[in-house]
């Protein structure tokens, strides 16, 4: 019998558990979790019963369980199941709500299964970062956005008043431009301007057109370009601009510029003397 691959990781920074089931055919009898579960179907078709309602789960469906929601599931086609999910304790969800929406309120998921492309992408990216051991605050950004969307679209409705906070946002962007070589955290930026994580993320994104993490990476890449143009090696450029390793640097540089750092460096290294 093919048992597939089962991966479970506890993220010490985010204080939540992520698990990945890939290539399994196991059925799960009626049971419940004491935590919130936010799951994403990646492959296979499953029949699920939750709170006396039956669902057919397909690729890209998001599964939402409140603590205590009873459910069972089994494979509904000839394929195996691939599924990733995060588990969040009740207390941790309250902490996240306070940070994401400014209210320490428990959420009650109004639906057990939804289809939402934006949330599915966020969940997949966040989950991958947790399993890959990412430490950058990009990971925390994605969690904050995901929690805010869950409260907005899947729980009790709420409204967020979003002032411009122009002065605070400029202070943060100036700080990033000066300290981009250092390790910067979301909490650090919030303390700098005395804003909540949710207000900071939404205000910064609205004003700058990108998240603080993307802004940081853009500053780093632009500075790295200057170093490469001066003949500095890609490895040294990565170290001088705050990237955690050369692989991380190469991936981001290629996404932003369309060339690898080595190829970009070579353009200037090979130019003839004038």
Image (cartoon, grey):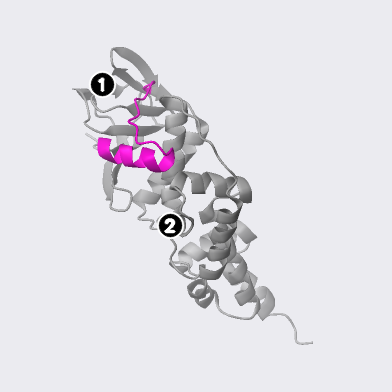
- Does residue 181 appear to the left or right of 27 in the view shown? right
Residue 210 locus on image (x, y percent): 59, 50
Image disc number at residue 191: 2
Residue 248 locus on image (x, y percent): 47, 62
Residue position marked by numbered label 1 in the rendering: 71
Magenta stretch holds residue 110: yes
Label 2 residue SS: helix
At horizontal 43% and vertical 26% (from top left) the residue drawn is: 154
Q: Quarter-wise, where is residue 113 in the image?
A: top left
Q: Residues within 10 Å of mark 2 (few under 14, many from 20)?
A: few
- Does residue 95 appear to the left or right of 33 in the view shown? right
- Does residue 223 appear to the left or right of 4 in the view shown? right
Cβ atoms under marks 2 and 1 closer than 8 Å: no
Residue 197 locus on image (x, y percent): 44, 48
Q: Give the residues drawn in magenta, as a range.
A: 89-112
At horizontal 57% and vertical 62% (from top left) the residue drawn is: 253
- Whole-angstrom CA distance, mark 2 to mark 1, is 42 Å
State the residue in front, 221 or 267. 221
Q: Residue furthest top?
A: 52
Q: Quarter-wise, where is residue 150 in the image?
A: top left
State the residue in front, 224 or 95. 95
Above or below 112: residue 194: below
The answer to whether one can see residue 274 in this image is: yes
Label 1 residue SS: strand
At horizontal 34% and vertical 50% (from top left) the residue drawn is: 131
Q: Nearer the viewer, mark 2 or mark 1?
A: 2
Above or below 73: residue 137: below
């Amino acid at each position: 019998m093919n048992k597939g691959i089962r991966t479970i990781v506890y993220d010490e920074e985010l204080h939540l558990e992520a698990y990945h089931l890939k290539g399994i055919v196991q059925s799960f009898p009626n049971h419940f979790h004491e935590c919130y579960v936010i799951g994403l179907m990646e492959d296979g078709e499953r029949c699920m019963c939750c709170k006396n309602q039956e669902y057919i789960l397909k690729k890209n469906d998001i599964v939402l369980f409140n603590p205590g929601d009873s459910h069972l599931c089994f494979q509904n086609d000839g394929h195996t199941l691939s599924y990733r999910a995060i588990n969040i304790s009740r207390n941790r969800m309250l902490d996240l709500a306070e940070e994401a929406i400014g209210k320490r309120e428990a959420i009650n998921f109004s639906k057990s299964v939804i289809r939402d492309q934006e949330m599915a992408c966020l969940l997949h990216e966040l989950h991958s970062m947790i399993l890959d051991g990412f430490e950058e605050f990009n990971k925390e950004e994605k969690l904050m956005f995901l929690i805010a969307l869950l409260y907005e679209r899947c729980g009790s409705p709420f409204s967020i008043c979003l002032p411009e906070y122009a002065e605070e946002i400029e202070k943060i962007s100036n700080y990033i431009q000066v300290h981009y070589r250092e390790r910067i955290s979301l909490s650090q930026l919030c303390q700098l301007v005395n804003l909540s994580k949710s207000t900071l993320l939404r205000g910064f994104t609205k004003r700058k057109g990108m998240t603080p993490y993307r802004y940081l990476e853009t500053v780093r890449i632009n500075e790295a370009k200057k170093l490469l143009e001066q003949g500095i090696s890609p490895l040294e450029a990565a170290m001088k601009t705050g990237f955690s390793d050369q692989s991380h640097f190469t991936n981001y540089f290629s996404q932003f510029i369309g060339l690898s750092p080595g190829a970009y460096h070579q353009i200037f290294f090979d130019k003839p003397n004038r």
